[in-house]
Image (cartoon, rainbow, N blue to C red):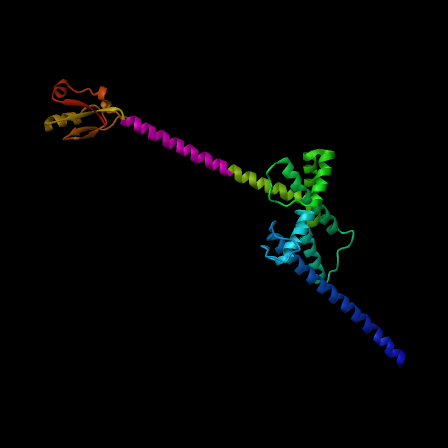
Amino acid sequence: MARGAARGRRPLAGFQAVLSSRLAAECSGVALLGLSLLTGLALASYVPSDPVFERAEVGNRAGIAGATLAALLFGCFGLGALVCVGATAVVGVRLALGRGLPAPTSRFWVSSALLLLSFATLPPLLQTAFPGFLAGVPRGALGLWLADGERLFIGVWGALLTNVLLLVIGAVSATGASTGALLGAAGALLGGIAAAFAALTAKLAQIFAQAVRAAGRGVASVAAGLRPAVRVEVGDQALAGLLTQVDTGVLAPHARPVQVRGVREHGLRQHGLHLDAAVSQSLEQVPVLL
């Protein structure tokens, strides 16, 4: 009976051990997730002038601890501190969900290392290649050391190219997407951008053409308005009736209207007015500039 009781306690003890280890892992994951959130707040509200390891007023939203933590992370890794916070958050989520730590040979650690190196090294290199660019971005000791060595062996632009490639490889490894899929998505995105640019260019060309035509019509209208016109006064209604019977060849479609009092407005060309002698003698022609 004693042996049976002992055998019954062994599975129970094993279950309790598993339960306690899982509970510890989940609690550790929650703690890491909370630490990453606090660190992210500290990095986002980082003030370079905040005192470190001092009991004083600071501008950091995470208080004295946040100011000290942000100064240490930025001082060591520069922008690579963001990668550290992100990796810590991922590990915390995995532990909280009971998925355990990533395997030592998993792509998580490889991508994290590549992203850390590229994020830490790119700001010093960009500041060297483009003076004044990213002047307010903190430069960590790791990034400065790597940037100095890379500039010595492969130059500034070679170092920039190398770290951009490391950034791309790290991003691809972190997402788990295949290179072919990413290239296809990039091609589709570039194609959409090109199509949108072509449509915008065609629309702008259409608007420009319409504006040019409108400007041409405006110039023609102004030019027509500056042409001389003739004001013909007809005092006798009989003579006015004779004027309305003049051949239409004397009308000028591009001239300003000529006022014929007592009849109507006609578009008569000043130098093309051919009337009968009897009629023309009774008309008073007064050139005016409308």
Question: Which quadrant of the view contains residue 206?
Answer: top left
The reply, left or right, for residue 1 in relation to residue 198 is right
Image quadrant holding the N terminus, namely bottom right
Is residue 176 visible in this depiction of the protein?
no
Q: Relative to 168, is 157 above or below?
A: above
The residue at 84%/75% (across/down) is 9
Question: Which quadrant of the view contains residue 56?
Answer: bottom right
User: In the orientation shown, which residue stands out farthest toward the top?
Assistant: 277
User: In the orientation shown, which residue stands out farthest toward the bottom?
Assistant: 1
Q: Of residues 245 and 183, which is closer to you in this image?
A: 183
The residue at 88%/78% (across/down) is 4
Q: Is residue 208 magenta?
A: yes
Question: Which quadrant of the view contains residue 141?
Answer: top right
Is residue 206 visible in this depiction of the protein?
yes
Count of numbered labels shown in the rendering: 0
The reply, left or right, for residue 149 in relation to residue 64 is right
Q: Relative to 228, is 63 above or below?
A: below
Q: Of residues 253 and 169, which is closer to you in this image?
A: 169
Q: Position of residue 30 (x, y in %)?
A: 68, 62
Q: Position of residue 287 (x, y in %)?
A: 19, 23
Q: Of residues 236 and 217, which is closer to you in this image?
A: 217
State whether the magenta stretch is mostly helix, strand or loop.
helix
The reply, left or right, for residue 287 in relation to residue 15 is left
Q: Is residue 97 magenta?
A: no
Q: Of residues 103 and 125, which is closer to you in this image?
A: 125
Q: Position of residue 70 (x, y in %)?
A: 65, 52
Image quadrant holding the C terminus, namely top left
Q: Relative to 115, is 56 above or below?
A: below
Q: Relative to 155, is 284 above or below?
A: above
The residue at 61%/56% (across/down) is 41
Q: What's the magenta region?
A: 199-225
